[in-house]
Amino acid sequence: MIQLCNNDTCTGCSACYNKCPRHAISMTENTEGFLNPIIDYNLCINCNLCTSVCPQLNSVNLSYPQKTFIGWINDGNIRRDSASGGAFSVLALYVLRKGGIVFGAKMDDDLVVRHCFIDNESYLYTLRDSKYVQSNMSDVLRTAKRFLEEGREVLFTGTSCQIGGLVKYLGKDYDNLITVDLLCHGVPSPKVFKDYIRWLEEYKGFSKITRIKFRDKAISNESPNCLIEGMGHKGEKITIIESRIYNKWIQAFLGNNIIRPACYNCKYVSPNRVSDYTIADWFGWDSRKYWEGREAQKGVSAIFCNTAKACSIIPSLNMVLHEVRVEHGIKNKNEFFHKCLRPTSREQFWTDYSSLSFNEVVVKYFQTSRLPLYIIYNSIHKHSIYTKLIVLFLRYLHKVKLKLKNR
C-alpha cells in the first residue's frame, strides 16, 4: 500500500495530487488547517507516480548562487506597491511582455490565498505584495505544465517547497520556464487566518474586511505597517493601520505556533537553492553604502541568480541594480541558515485552540513580547546614531541566541 508524507513532513506542495493519473488523491484540510494528500485506495492503481514526484521523499537538485544583486524596479508606482523593491514584478513584466504566463499567490475576495496564473500585466497587482498565509496550490502544476508544453514562457513563483514540488512534478528541465522562490520564515495556517479575519471583524467593528496588506510602505520600507480595510455595519469605510509589532497576525506568525510542522525541518534552509532566482528584502544600514538619501526606505530587493539562465536575463530587467558579493548577500539573510524554530508552547497552543475562544487564544499567544527583539527594534524609525548602534547590538545578540539554540 502506497504511503505518502505524514502531517509532520508534508509541505502541501500538491505534486502528488497533480500527478495522480486516476485522481485518487485529494488535498484535505487537517486539524491545524493545512492541506495534506489523502489517497482513495479504491481508485489507486499502485503506479507509485505520487511518491516518485514527492520532493520530501526524493532528492531535489539545488544550486549555489552565481551572482547577487540588490536594487529596485524603475517604475516608482510599482515599487511603492511592492513588498520590497519590486523584483517579482520586474521579472513578471519581462515574461508577460513576451506573451508569457506568470504564476503566483493571490488573495481573493474572500481573503483566501490561492496560487493562480495571469497572462496580462493589468492583473499583476493581484500577485504582488506579501501574503503571510500558505497558498492553496490546487491544480496549478498541471496548468503550468500545459503552458510549457504549448511553448509559452512561464514564470512560476512560490516558496522553496512549492518550487520543489513543481520541479519534481515536471520531471525535466524546460528552457521556457523561469522559477523564483521567496526566502521564507515558514507558512502559517489558513484555518487560523480565517479565524483571525472573523475575530478582526468582530472586535474592530467591521461588517466585512475587504483587503489586508501586510507590508504597507506609506511611511518606510524599513518599518512597514499592516493595512486593513473594510466596511462598517452602517456601510462606512473603515481603515486600520497598525505597526507590525502590534498586529496580532504578525505576532502569531513570528511566534511560530501556527507554522506548518514541515517548516521546522525545512530541507531548503541553505544557500543552495531550488530555483533560478531567490528574491528577498534587503534591509540593513549597509544599504546606505550604495544609495544616498531615502532610497533604501522606499524598498530594496535582493536577487540571487542561482543558474546561468537567471544570470543571462538580468541585463534585460528594467531595474536599478548593484552587484554585491554572493557571500555578502547570503550573510545579510538569516533565512538561508536558520530554520523556523518549533516553540515549546506549540502542543499546548493547539490544545488551547480547540478548547478556548479565539479571543482567548489571541490574548494568551499573540503578544508583542513573544516577538524577537530584533523584529521589534527594526520596526522603530532608526534616525539617530544611538538607535542604529542599539539595533546592531540587538541583531548581534539575536544571532548568538540562534546559534546557541541550533547547537
Image (cartoon, rainbow, N blue to C red):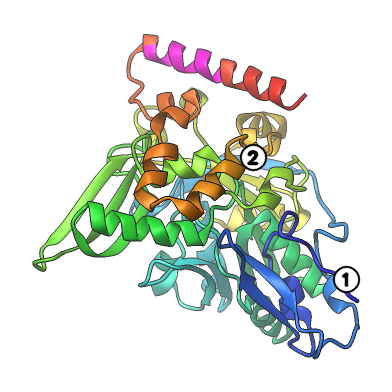
In the image, residue 280 lies at what x, y percent?
56, 44
SS for callout 2: loop
Q: Is residue 354 magenta?
A: no
Question: On the picture, is 52 further left or further right than 211?
Answer: right
Badge 1 is on which residue? 52
Q: Which residues are magenta?
A: 387-395
SS for callout 1: helix
Vertical relation: 131 (above or below) 301: below
Question: Disc 1 to disc 2, how far (Cα)?
Answer: 27 Å
In the image, residue 313 lies at what x, y percent?
65, 58
Query: For residue 310, what is the image quadrant?
Result: bottom right
Badge 2 is on which residue? 340
Question: On the picture, is 397 further left or further right than 212?
Answer: right
The quadrant of the rendering that contains the N terminus is: bottom right
Nearer to us in this view, 190 or 168:
190
Label 2 Cα neighbours within 10 Å, binned few <14 / some 14-19 / many ≥20 = many
Question: On the picture, is 216 further left or further right than 93?
Answer: left
In the image, residue 395 lies at what x, y percent?
54, 20
Residue 53 visible at all: yes
Residue pictured at 70% horizontal, 25% vertical: 405
Residue 258 visible at all: no
Which amino acid type is marked by label 1?
Answer: Ser
Nearer to us in this view, 295 or 45:
45
Which amino acid type is marked by label 2?
Answer: Cys
Residue pictured at 84% horizontal, 57% vertical: 60
Residue pictured at 49% horizontal, 44% vertical: 253
Question: On the picture, is 284 further left or further right than 239?
Answer: right
In the image, residue 6 lies at what x, y percent?
76, 61
Residue pictured at 47% horizontal, 56% vertical: 192
Q: What secondary structure prevails in the magenta region?
A: helix
The quadrant of the rendering that contains the C terminus is: top right
